[in-house]
Image (cartoon, helix red, strand yellow):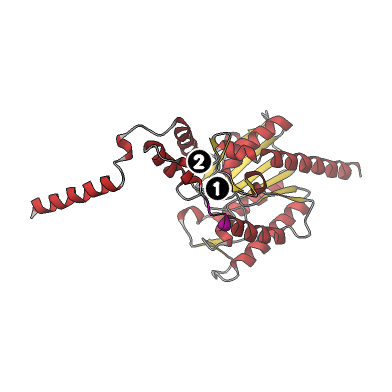
Amino acid sequence: MVGLEVTILFAGLGSTIYACNGFPRRGPDASDSIKDLRREAEAFQVSPCLVRGGTLPGVNHCLLGAPSAKSEYSVVFWRDSHAAQFAPAIDDIGHHLGLTAREITKAGCPPITGVDFFPVANDRRECRAFNDAVLRSVLADGHIQVVILSARWDSIVNGTYFLTDNGSREDSEKLFVESLQKMLTSLVWSGRRVILVTQVPLPPENLIGCITWAQFNHGDERACEITNQAKHRETEARVNEALLKVVTGLQPNVQIVRPFSSLCGPLGCNVRAAGQLLYMDDVHLSPDGARLVIGDLERSISSQVTAATKSRNLVTSN
């Protein structure tokens, strides 16, 4: 009986190897660009600024842009883990504009206060306490002029998880709009300016794995780059519709930056530019991808900091 089981095992294993054209680890490693992306993804996951619990990260390890001797910062970049991809771009912008920014990131928690997230996974268990603490911290710090908010908003809009204030999953999208608008209003009334970064276009599923496999098998990598544009457009439309409701009555104190405008065109959304991959995995932009959005982000940050400074000067002079 044991011999028969071993025979069946090896027969099945042989079939798997044949169907997969051999094991990929048997041949050469992935290209240097793929290795670099893997290193970026690994470094991102162990960043001290990617909070897993309920307490705010330390300031000194989470500053971007121009150096600050007193660890003071005028910009806060508040996001979930899916938006940490913009940190390299904001670091570049901060150096260029002479600004210091603090990044505040909690895995699985879009920056929305006063709500709980359902289902309650480990990384979302303390979302409400964490987000409420961030808002209190921002409102208490007189140096902060601009708050940048970014997240994978489509997870709420498409029902991957729900927002709740009383245990009910009903009207989650309505609660999303109302809660985010209430939070933005409190920031605007406190004299802060806000930048809301909308949904990043999602790449084809298993993009990096597909490209790695194509490289090993000398296949056509372009086949991995085919994407469902209808899905992208539908996602963008739903998220934008919800976020436009959020900012109603709050503009120009709240500005919107749309990554779709930098990453997509009439023929679809790109996964490469100048030969470089724009994604490090199935969700996150690579540093090259994030830097494509740098122009829109820098213009928005610059204008919002200028507007906030003028407002404070008027208040001081009066």
Residue linked to disc 1: 82
* Disc nearest the viewer among 1 and 2: 2
Residue linked to disc 2: 280
Q: Residue at x 39, y 37 (%)?
A: 218
Q: Amino acid at mark 1?
A: His
Q: Is residue 230 magenta?
A: yes
Disc with the residue nearer the chain's start (1 vs 2): 1
Quadrant the N terminus occupies: bottom left
Which residue is nearer to you in this view: 138 or 152? 152
Q: Mark 1: few, some, or many residues within 10 Å (few <14, many ≥20)?
A: many
Q: CA distance from mark 1 to mark 2?
A: 11 Å
Q: Mark 2: few, some, or many residues within 10 Å (few <14, many ≥20)?
A: many
Quadrant the C terminus occupies: top right
Counting from the top left corner in percent of width and height, residue 274 is at 58, 34
Q: Is residue 156 magenta?
A: no
Q: Main secondary structure of the magenta part?
A: helix
- Say whether residue 179 is left or right of residue 128: right
Classify 257 as above or below 237: above
Q: Name the secondary structure under disc 1.
A: helix
Q: Splitting the image into 4 quarters, where does residue 294 fall?
A: top right
Q: Residue at x 77, y 40 (%)?
A: 305
Q: Amino acid at mark 2?
A: Met
Instruction: Say whether residue 270 is visible.
Output: yes
Q: Splitting the image into 4 quarters, where does residue 95 fall?
A: top right
Counting from the top left corner in percent of width and height, residue 46 is at 47, 39
From which residue to which does the magenta span run?
227-231
Instruction: Say whether residue 59 is visible.
Output: no
